[in-house]
Image (spheres, helix red, strand yellow):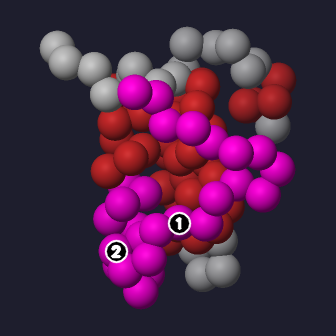
Amino acid sequence: MVLEKYPDNNKTADALLYKGRALVKMPGHKTEGGNEFMEVIRRYPKSDQATQACTTAGRSAWAAERRPPPPLETQEVKMPPLYHR
């Protein structure tokens, strides 16, 4: 897979975001999509893609019984502190 072959590419954040968006639209894959969004947020916390991942994850959770997405099973994700621009 391209993401595994080129993990440090400048388009990796975009690819993870698009992968997450595709997964949440597939029946039975919402958790996997949420995990991709969390990976974007963890790896690129101050990026535009992280902001989009937060927004998309929130919308997906609201649409799916209005519950937040489940946490990653393998690690605890800590959200970066908010910063003022």
Q: Amino acid at mark 1?
A: Pro
Q: Main secondary structure of the magenta part?
A: loop
Closer to the camera, 33 or 2?
33
Q: Which residue is mark 2?
A: 62
Which residue is depicted at the point 75% across and 19% down? 6
Q: x, y percentage for residue 12?
A: 60, 25
Looking at the image, residue 61 sits to the left or right of residue 34; the answer is left
Which residue is depicted at the point 64% across and 53% down? 35
Q: x, y percentage for residue 19?
A: 58, 48
Q: Which residues are magenta?
A: 56-81
Closer to the camera, 75 or 21?
75
Q: Which residue is mark 1?
A: 69
The quarter in which the N terminus is drawn is top right
Mark 1 and mark 2: Cα distance apart in space: 9 Å
Q: Helix, strand or loop at disc 1?
A: loop
Query: Which image quadrant for residue 66?
Result: bottom left
